[in-house]
Image: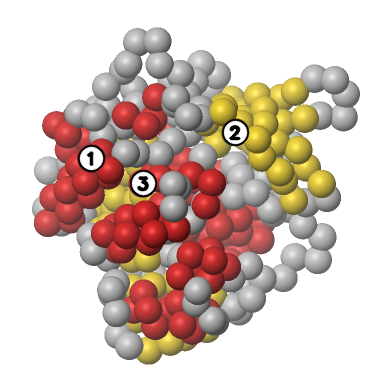
């Protein structure tokens, strides 16, 4: 069987967002889910699999619940309050055989530092072993460290886990401020050079500053697309990842892929409150949500918005 699918591993949470009145709106989001949303929108007919509890070949755990977070928006920036300590997704690697089944015949496997952070040490080891097997079988592996201090017991634990993940990755998509906080990098160039010694293809994101590509020992900056009045910055980096990976799977060179990814991220930060129809397979894999139509705010832009930005 040809390896043509894309798989993203992690946690999709319930999202509560405050409105102008007394009511809250419920949605669904999570870093690896946000990336898969964009990747699926931009990858044509490629099958998309979200690997988490009760999704794909992952087990269903009776009585287990998804994580939950509430958001408040100040200007274009969000603040988050989480309830995820007992989330079912923390057991996504509890069945190695099921995890391996979800990663079979995938052209691309994607995961993040948040995926690692919600797992205990033994589950992380299982996850990385199965990702390594998928890579050996021909899957391209992409990883975003996406460091979030509150999810880790210590900075040293995060450093060790992320270095282990980079050992099984073909593409790394770090963000400079995160790497500065975690590893003390002095500049994006330092991040790119450090990652370039570990992974063959690296793109260092840095907000509205140029992204920096590191391949074959060379560094190439690619200017970002300026947005004068962003509406909601949530999910910009995740959508950038989805755009970049979709472009690379389609055969675009890294610099062109970064330009497309910048346009996608710029479009996402200008989205609020639009309605989009999600394909049934993507929604069913998002914690078995019942609705076929989701309200998208920031992180999950309508497919047509993503596609228009991607094509430029």
Using the numbered discs, state the Cα–Cα distance from disc 1 to disc 2 in whole angstroms.
Answer: 24 Å
x and y percentages locating residue 275 in the rendered image = 68, 33
Give residue 211's quadrant in the image.
bottom right
Q: CA distance from mark 1 to mark 3?
A: 11 Å
Helix, strand or loop under label 1: helix
| Disc with the residue nearer the chain's start (3 vs 2) | 2
Contact check, label 3 and label 2, Cβ < 8 Å: no
Give 72 or 6, whichever is nearer the viewer: 72
Which x, y percent locates residue 249? 34, 60
Q: Considering depth in this image, is 212 or 70 the residue closer to the camera?
A: 70
Q: Is residue 290 above or below residue 49?
A: above
Label 2: which secondary element: strand
Q: Which mark is residue 116?
A: 3
Q: Residue at x 60, y 55 (%)?
A: 236
Residue 122 - label: 1
Q: Mark 2 highlights which residue?
A: 82
**Which quadrant does the N terminus fall into?**
top left
Label located before the other in sequence (1 or 2): 2
């Amino acid at each position: 069987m040809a390896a043509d699918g894309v798989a993203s591993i992690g946690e999709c949470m319930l999202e509560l967002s405050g409105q102008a009145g007394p009511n809250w709106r419920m949605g669904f989001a999570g870093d690896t889910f946000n990336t898969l949303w964009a990747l699926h929108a931009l990858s044509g007919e490629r099958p998309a699999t979200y690997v988490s509890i009760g999704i794909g070949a992952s087990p269903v755990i009776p009585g287990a619940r998804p994580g939950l977070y509430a958001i408040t928006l100040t200007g274009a920036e969000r603040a988050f309050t989480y309830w995820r300590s007992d989330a079912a997704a923390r057991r996504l690697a509890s069945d190695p055989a099921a995890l391996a089944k979800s990663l079979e015949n995938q052209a691309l496997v994607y995961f993040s530092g948040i995926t690692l952070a919600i797992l205990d040490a033994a589950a992380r080891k299982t996850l990385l072993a199965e990702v390594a097997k998928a890579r050996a079988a021909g899957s391209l592996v992409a990883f975003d460290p996406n460091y979030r201090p509150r999810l880790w017991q210590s900075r040293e634990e995060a450093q060790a886990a992320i270095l282990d993940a980079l050992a099984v990755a073909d593409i790394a998509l770090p963000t400079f401020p995160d790497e500065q906080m975690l590893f003390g990098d002095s500049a994006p160039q330092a991040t790119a050079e450090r990652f370039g010694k570990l992974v063959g293809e690296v793109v260092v994101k840095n907000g509205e500053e140029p992204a920096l590509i590191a391949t074959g020992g060379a560094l190439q900056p690619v200017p970002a697309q300026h947005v004068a009045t962003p509406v909601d910055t949530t999910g910009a980096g995740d959508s950038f990842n989805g755009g970049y990976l979709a472009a690379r799977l389609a055969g675009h060179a890294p610099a062109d892929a970064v330009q497309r990814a910048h346009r996608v991220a710029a479009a996402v930060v200008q989205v609020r409150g639009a309605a989009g129809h999600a394909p049934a397979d993507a929604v069913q894999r998002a914690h078995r949500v019942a609705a076929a139509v989701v309200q998208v705010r920031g992180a999950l832009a309508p497919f047509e918005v993503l596609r228009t930005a991607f094509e430029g």
